[in-house]
Amino acid sequence: MIDHIGIAQSDSRPPVTSGPAVSSCLYKRYNRSFQMDNRLAFENIEPAAYRALLGLGSYVESSGLDPKVLDLIKIRASQLNGCAFCLDMHTTEARKAGEAEQRLHALAAWREAPFFSPTERAALAFGEALTQMAQERIADAVYTELAQHFSQEDAGKLLMAVIAINAWNRLAVATGLVAGTQEQHFRQLRQRGILAGEAVK
C-alpha cells in the first residue's frame, strides 16, 4: 500500500487509539476501499484562516474579470496540481454556466486546440507558468502576451485569481477533501459558522 507521499506502507500497522496524544494530533486517517491516507484534518484548520481565503475568493469573483476566463484558470490549475475535489467542483460549475464540453475536454491540451480565444490563451499561459514556477522560470514572453490582452489592473486581478486557486488546491489536497463531496463540505463549514450560505470560490 502506498501513502500520500509515495512511501510503501504495511496493512498491518496498529490502529489509532484514543487518548490525548491522538486527540491533539493534526492528522486523521481516511479509509476508502482503494486507499488509506493520513492527511491534515480539515477540522483543525483555523476558521479565521479559512475566512481569509474565502475573502480572497470573493475578491476574485467580484473583480470584473470574465467568468469564463476564471473558470478556465481554476480548472487548469486544478489539473496541474492534481486536485480532484477542485477539478470536480469547478468543471461542474463551468458546465452549469454554459461552458462547452468540447472546451472542457480540450483544456488540458489547450495549446493544440482551436477552441480558445487569444485572451483566454494568454490567461492560461500565465496561470500555467505561475502554477508551475517551481519547475521552470516564468518566461518573459508570458508577460508580454499577457500585456497584449490585459491591462495592468486586470493582470493584477488575474494574478490573485491564480494565487487563490492554487491555495484552494493545496488546502483540498492536504486535508484529503474527496471529489463529489462539495455539498457535505459546505454543510460542515456552515455548521462551524465559517460559511453563511455562500459557496467556496
Image (cartoon, rainbow, N blue to C red):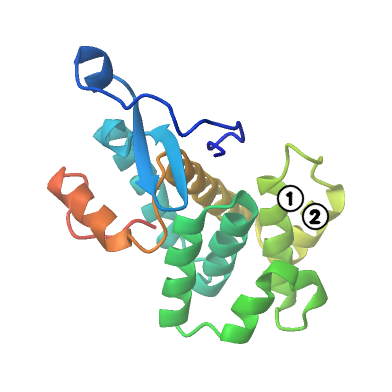
Place of residue 65 in the rendered image (x, y in percent of width and height, measured from the top left): 52, 66
CA separation in Å, label 1 and label 2: 8 Å
Q: Tell me residue 132's x, y (percent).
A: 71, 45
- Is 41 left or right of 73, judged from the image as shown? left
Q: Is residue 193 above or below residue 87?
A: above
Residue 162 location (% of width, % of height): 57, 51
In the displayed orientation, state which residue is furthest to the top: 21
Where the C terminus falls, by quadrant? Answer: bottom left
The quarter of the picture where residue 85 lies is bottom left
- Crowding near the residue tagged with mark 1, few <14, some 14–19, many ≥20 C-alpha atoms within 10 Å: some
Residue on which disc 1 sits: 129
Residue 136 seen by the camera: yes
Q: In the picture provided, is 39 more to the left or to the right than 145?
A: left
Marks 1 and 2, the one that precedes in the sequence = 1
Task: Identify the amino acid type marked 1.
Answer: Ala
> Disc 1, disc 2: CB below 8 Å?
yes
Instruction: Identify the element where label 1 is drawn.
Output: helix
Q: Residue at x 81, y 41 (%)?
A: 136
Residue 89, horizontal then vertical, whole percent? 42, 65
Pointer 2 residue: 142
Q: Nearer the viewer, residue 15 or 100?
A: 15
Is disc 2 placed on a helix, strand or loop?
Answer: helix
Disc nearest the viewer among 1 and 2: 1
Residue in the picture at 42% in, 26% down = 13
Q: Amino acid at mark 2?
A: Val
Along the horizontal axis of the image, is 42 left or right of 57? left
Residue 154 appears in the picture as rendered:
no
Number of marks drawn:
2
Residue at the spot 58% in from the left edge and 52% down from the top edge:
82
Residue at image point 36% right, 35% down: 29
On-image quarter of the N terminus: top right
